[in-house]
Image: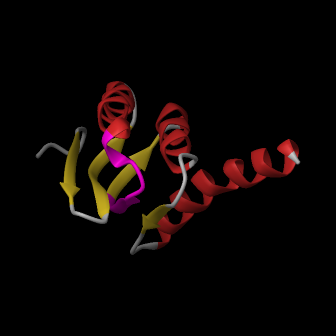
């Protein structure tokens, strides 16, 4: 896989669904993730959702916005393993926390 692409894998289980991202959540790949989420969202239902960022190498502004949109849907866990992916998870959750406070 080229370092400039994004591989999106979906692992559905009876009580959870995992979205596994490998590569760059940027440019046209952010749009592809958004399209994938639009198709997947109706099937999530009450299942727990996890987004595996462990093999994510980069995310631009639109990519972070798509991740925020997915994260904001409910019981979503962000899986990280490096300082970079931890930082990305903090960026994704930061705006969601601010939005929640503003809505109060």
Q: Residue at x 86, y 44 (%)?
A: 102
Q: Residue at x 42, y 73 (%)?
A: 82
Q: Locate residue 43 relative to residue 2 in the image: left or right.
A: right
Q: Where is residue 6 in the image (x, y as percent from the top left)?
A: 25, 41
Residue at figure coordinates x 47%, y 65% from the top left: 77
Horizontal arrangement in the rendering, residue 73 relative to residue 5 (left or right): right
Q: Which residue is drawn at 73% across and 55% down?
A: 97
Q: Where is residue 71 in the image (x, y as percent from the top left)?
A: 52, 50
Magenta-highlighted residues: 43-55
What colouring method underlies this structural image?
Answer: secondary structure
Q: Where is residue 90 in the image (x, y as percent from the top left)?
A: 61, 61
Q: Residue 57 occupies which quadrant of the picture?
A: bottom left
Q: In which quarter of the image is residue 42?
A: top left
Residue in the foreground of this view, choosing between 15 and 7:
15
Query: Does 14 appear in magenta?
Result: no
Would you say the magenta stretch is mainly helix, strand or loop?
Answer: strand
Residue in front for this viewpoint, 68 or 84: 68
The answer to whether residue 48 is magenta is yes
Count of numbered marks: 0
Image position, residue 56 (x, y; %) = 34, 55
């Amino acid at each position: 896989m080229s370092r400039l692409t994004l591989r999106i894998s979906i692992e559905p289980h009876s009580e959870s669904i995992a979205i596994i991202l490998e590569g760059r959540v940027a440019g046209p790949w952010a749009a592809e993730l958004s399209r994938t989420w639009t198709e997947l969202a109706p099937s999530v239902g009450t299942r727990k959702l996890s987004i595996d960022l462990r093999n994510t190498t980069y995310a631009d502004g639109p990519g972070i916005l798509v991740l925020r949109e997915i994260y904001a849907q409910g019981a979503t866990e962000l899986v990280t393993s490096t300082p970079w992916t931890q930082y990305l998870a903090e960026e994704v959750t930061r705006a969601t926390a601010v939005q929640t406070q503003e809505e109060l």
